[in-house]
Image (cartoon, rainbow, N blue to C red):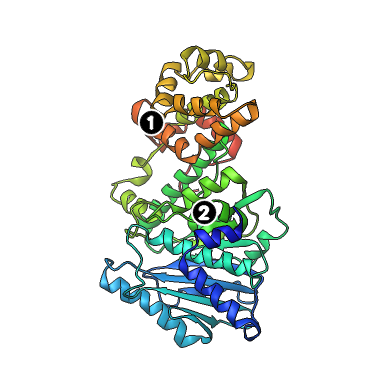
Amino acid sequence: MSMQQYLARYAESDASEVQHYLQHAKADFDRSWEHVLCIPAFAEAAAFLEKLTVNIQQQSALIILVVNASAKADPGKIEQTRQIAAHLCRHYSCTATIARHIQLLSMGDKLDVMLVEHVSPGLFLVEKESVGLARKIACDIACQCIAMGVVKTPWIHSSDADAVLPHDYFQAAANLDTEQISAGIYPFQHTPHKENDIVHAQQCYDLAMDYYVAGLKWAGSPWAFHTIGSTLLINSQHYAQARGFPRRQAGEDFYLLNKLAKIGEVINLQCAPLALESRLSDRVPFGTGPALLKIMTLDDPQQQYLYYHPDCFLALKCWLHISQTLQPETSGSLSLETITTAKTSVEAFSTIFSKVDSKLLLQCLKALGVDKAMAHAGSHSKTKHTYARHMHDWFDAFQTLKFIHWMRDNALPSLPLHEIRGLESTAAIQKQSGLVLNPAA
């Protein structure tokens, strides 16, 4: 799908309003920017944008800020969100009124804010779509600006109000392959919090995220990357092909990256880390904020917080090896014999894979629908390459997570950190990734 097709068929109406304005402004609009940054904001401190941009004030960039709330949100938080827009309008001059709810404000010679207000009757977002829709609105507008040439780069930066961007933030996107790379993940670190309980909870959660990514990488999974909305760089062409951010209350970053990784490469970017604030939150059903709240209910988080059993990743490694041996002519039903044969087909893996229970692995894959996936891949493939592509797209980031969770729930329960440190699979994961399994490290 081309950018123009996406904008015409699937983009939010805000992007069309920006297009209409730019088409009619023509000579009267003389602004353009090298970069574009998309931020959703709800119930944030009014002056958060000054903190977020403190290191990039001299960069040529358009910040598309979508202040948003649902009509069902707490009235106090709705008012707090409105104060973000009020603060910006008091402190920065308006250089263009694009629509009744969209203004262009100047933060300096090079930095501008396109303020998009969805925090009043007729403009409130649907509660179940909230942050996903807010991100989609911002990125759809970014695509429109890129398509019309007022933003020069094809890359969309996506972050959050709790971030502080490093001085070399935009430089990390320079010279990237726009044909092959669909997304990039910025390095990040959480800033210390004045409350020790939150610090300890954040350390546990960060370690759990790093451990999961390291486990996937050791297993050979192509989905081994962090999925945090504040750390994303998105190729606008691939974004259009993926039909944009999903309208979800949470997990929108995970699901977009899941689609982008199927049509291009997701890479880790090289620059100074983004500084993210450690904070408690119940505004979404899952994610960092809710996870911290849950961890803090434990009497001793560093002893009681549970991590995936490392043998879940061993089972995943075994399945990924087996999946590579499957052929288009393979029947639509995965058999115990196929698993057993594949486990011993490569001498380098035969010993380590002997620890994996073949019957249990087969049961897990059947529960995930492997037979249906194989039948579909077989009926739509004439070559091994095409077959592998279909199986790769089926066993995506979501199926991978379901695989790990099935193993956790049915065979390999999660363990506290002190119990997983000495396990053989843990040592292998640590050796490859360099991960230190210590939440205080």
The percent coordinates of residue 169 (x first, y second) are 62, 64
Residue shown at 45% from the left, 40% from the top = 398
In the figure, 232 relative to 406: above or below?
below
* Disc 1 element: helix
345 is higher (above) or lower (below) than 7: above
- In the image, 247 versus 109, the foreground residue is 247
Residue type, numbered disc 1: Trp
Residue at left offset 41%, top offset 83%: 86
**In this rendering, position of residue 169 left or right of residue 253:** right
Q: Nearer the viewer, residue 219 or 138?
A: 138
Residue type at mark 2: give it.
Answer: Arg
Q: CA distance from mark 1 to mark 2?
A: 30 Å
Task: Give 275 or 247, whichever is nearer the viewer.
Answer: 247
Residue denoted by label 1? 406
Mark closer to the chain start, 1 or 2: 2
Q: Which residue is mark 2?
A: 243
The disc label shown at residue 71, or none = none
Residue 135 appears in the picture as rendered: yes
